[in-house]
Amino acid sequence: MSTIAQVAERAGVSRTTVSHVINHADRVSKSLRERVQKAIDELGYAPNPQAQSLRTGRTNIIAMLIPDIRNPFYPELVKTAQSELEAVGLDMLIFNTDVPGGRSEEHGREYLRQIGRKRVDGLIVGDFALHGMHDHLIGIDTPTVFIGDLPNQAVDSVKIDDFGGGYQMGAYLAKKGHRRVANVTGPSFFQEAMARADGFERGLADHGAPVARDLRFEGSYLAPSGREAAIWLLEKHGGNLPSAIFFANYLMASGALAEFYDRGLRVPQDIAVAVFGDQQQLEYVRPKLTRVGNSPAALAKRATEMLLERLGGRYDGPPRSEVVPCFLREFDTA
């Protein structure tokens, strides 16, 4: 079995430097880190995790809570965070609180207990994963970053500009001449969902398009509710369809597109479709969806940076609250 001394000799550095790469990778330059890692890989050196944790007081593990592993937004969020953490020698534990399953509070409480017992070095919370449990973050001992709208500002947070993104799309559709527009929102108990809906309707109104409350449908953020919204629209307004429809996320838009296709409606000839969100999966949807938002990767990257700043001692001030801007991208559907 190889030793830390052998790794140091192979890499041409001191044993202290090897220890820093293993235990405090964020404090070591990338070139030096790669050199030491190469020696570790060549020699097959494996530090003892228990001894390492006792010596440094760190586990080199970051926990991440997400609300729904089936939603394509979250795998991209997780993958980006994982890549950023791996680059500085940290591992990740992922917990899915399963908000659609209806037991998210039970899962959230249990996972927070597990996280406390495992003594992880940090925690990243994906927006709705702790829905209704934000106060559990007040006074938390573990450095934490929340992705989404955190009303109590108990920990660092970064969110997308939901109102601003919705406003951009409302203004865009109004400028395109749409005057009768449907709005399929997320659940009303999610603050972010209502911010998107309100921003969208304000954008319409500010640019000359009336807001029709009878064309507002509350969805669940899941694909079946998008199909339900399409059925509702066709059954209730089939004789006078709106010229455009806006979906608060991609999953609902995908459900509606399937129903429109099955019913023989053409997009955008019969109805224009726009969506909030900019996940990688949208690049493979045809017709290509006109969209507003930012990628999950951008949120995860900034959240990870904020956490590493805490862990590395580069920031130790009060909780920060940052907003990632939205960008509108015009494609085939609107």
Image: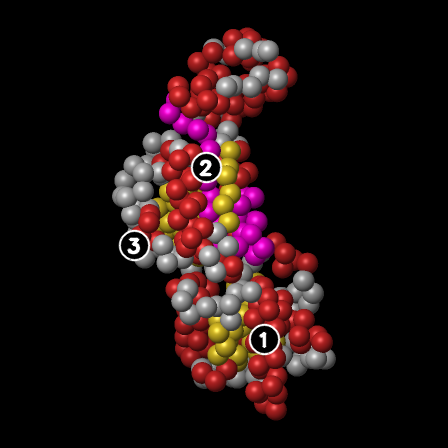
| Residue at mark 1 | 228
Choose the circle earlier in sequence order: 3 or 1.
3
Residue 330 position by quadrant: bottom right
Q: Calculate the distance from the C-alpha at mark 1 to the C-alpha at mark 2.
A: 39 Å
Q: Calculate the distance from the C-alpha at mark 3 to the C-alpha at mark 1.
A: 34 Å
Above or below residue 24? Residue 140 is below
Residue 213 position by quadrant: bottom left
Position of residue 232 measured from the top left corner of the image (x, y, whole percent): 57, 81
| Residue at mark 2 | 62
Counting other residues with Cα less than 10 Å from the Cα at mark 3, is it few (<14), some (14-19), or many (20 or more)? few
Position of residue 75 measured from the top left corner of the image (x, y, whole percent): 57, 49
Position of residue 2 measured from the top left corner of the image (x, y, whole percent): 58, 11
Counting other residues with Cα less than 10 Å from the Cα at mark 1, is it few (<14), some (14-19), or many (20 or more)? some
- Image point 34% across, 53% down: which residue? 134
Which span is picked out in magenta?
56-80
Counting other residues with Cα less than 10 Å from the Cα at mark 2, is it few (<14), some (14-19), or many (20 or more)? many
Q: Amino acid at mark 1?
A: Glu
Does the magenta portion include 304? no
Identify the element where label 3 is drawn: loop
Position of residue 249 measured from the top left corner of the image (x, y, whole percent): 54, 64
Q: Calculate the distance from the C-alpha at mark 3 to the C-alpha at mark 2.
A: 23 Å
- Image point 70% across, 80% down: which residue? 263
Q: Amino acid at mark 2?
A: Ile
| Residue at mark 3 | 152
Above or below residue 48? Residue 129 is below
Identify the element where label 2 is drawn: strand
Identify the element where label 1 is drawn: helix
Q: Nearer the viewer, mark 3 or mark 1?
A: 1
Looking at the rendered image, the quarter that the N terminus falls into is top right
Relative depth, front residue between 297 and 148: 148
